[in-house]
Amino acid sequence: MKTLLVLVASEDIEQAEVKNITSQIELYGIKSDQYDVKTKNDLTKALHNGSKYDYIYLATHGCDTNFGNISGTLNITWIQFAAMICASECYKANSIFLHSCCRGGLNQVAWKMFNCCEQIEFVCGPRNNITPLDLIIAFNLFLFHVEVRKLDPVVAADKVRDAIDIRLVCYDRLDAEADPAYLKHCELIAEEVDEAFSDYDE
């Protein structure tokens, strides 16, 4: 059975969004686990719950550098997140990361995660600022195209853009690794990656 991990990382995230996604995937025979993560410790515990997931759905506020909550108790860079994911081994082969937040689909977000954790294969999210309703519709369509129509995740994201004019993008590690800009970006963030693993180990 496929599984989805929902990480609710901000207090004001619409519960309707989470209920919608978890209800939808039940129709596809996918089991979900949901965790409210208000601190880095909460996030660590959720990732180390002993399960491995096909999808990891992050419901949060975000930007090009980090995600967190409005109260300020959680503030995680994308590099730190990838390091935590890598150390937890909570993913299955070809798992898909769904960033339900503003700017979660920027190329530098995906590149940071790919470079920090070589086991991350797909990262999907919006490139622009986006409303909760838009996020729900976008990921509903994405999951439908992947699970029901059996489309490649990159193509599924393209279908979302064609349908509702939202810049949802899915990045494939293999495509990124062939991009000279990705390789240059990896050089620029090498020290941050090392620091992230060092902090996590501590």
Image (spheres, rainbow, N blue to C red):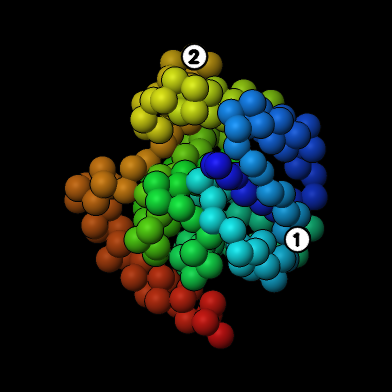
- Screen quadrant of the C terminus: bottom right
10 Å neighbourhood of mark 2: few (<14), some, or many (≥20)? few
- Residue 107 position in % (x across, y down): 39, 45
Q: Secondary structure at mark 1?
A: loop
Labelled pair 1, 2 in contact (Cβ < 8 Å): no
Relative image position of residue 39 (x, y in whole percent): 72, 66
Tell me the tag on residue 163.
Answer: 2
Calculate the distance from the C-alpha at mark 1 to the C-alpha at mark 2: 34 Å
Dot 2: element? helix
Q: Is residue 143 above or below residue 86?
A: above
Q: Quick one: 61 or 55, which is closer to the camera?
A: 55
**Which quadrant does the N terminus fall into?**
top right
Question: In the drawing, does residue 62 fall left or right of residue 74?
Answer: left
Looking at numbered disc 1 in the image, what kind of residue is underneath it?
Lys
Residue pictured at 24% horizontal, 51% vertical = 177
| Residue 112 lies in quadrant | bottom left
Task: Check the image and report above or below for 85 versus 127.
Answer: below
Q: Which mark is residue 24?
A: none
Q: Please report whichever mark, 1 or 2, sits nearer to the chain's N-terminal start.
A: 1
Residue 112 appears in the picture as rendered: no
72 relative to 180 in the view: left or right: right
Quarter of image, res 194: bottom left
Q: Residue at x 53, y 16 (%)?
A: 164
Is the residue marked by circle 1 packed among few (<14), some (14-19), or many (20+) residues within 10 Å? many
Q: Which residue is mark 1?
A: 38
Q: Position of residue 156 (x, y in %)?
A: 42, 26
Residue kind at label 2, given as amino acid type: Ala
Asked if residue 18 is positioned above or below residue 34 in the image, the reply reads above
Q: Please name the residue shown 40% across and 62% down the image.
A: 117
Q: Is residue 99 left or right of residue 42?
A: left
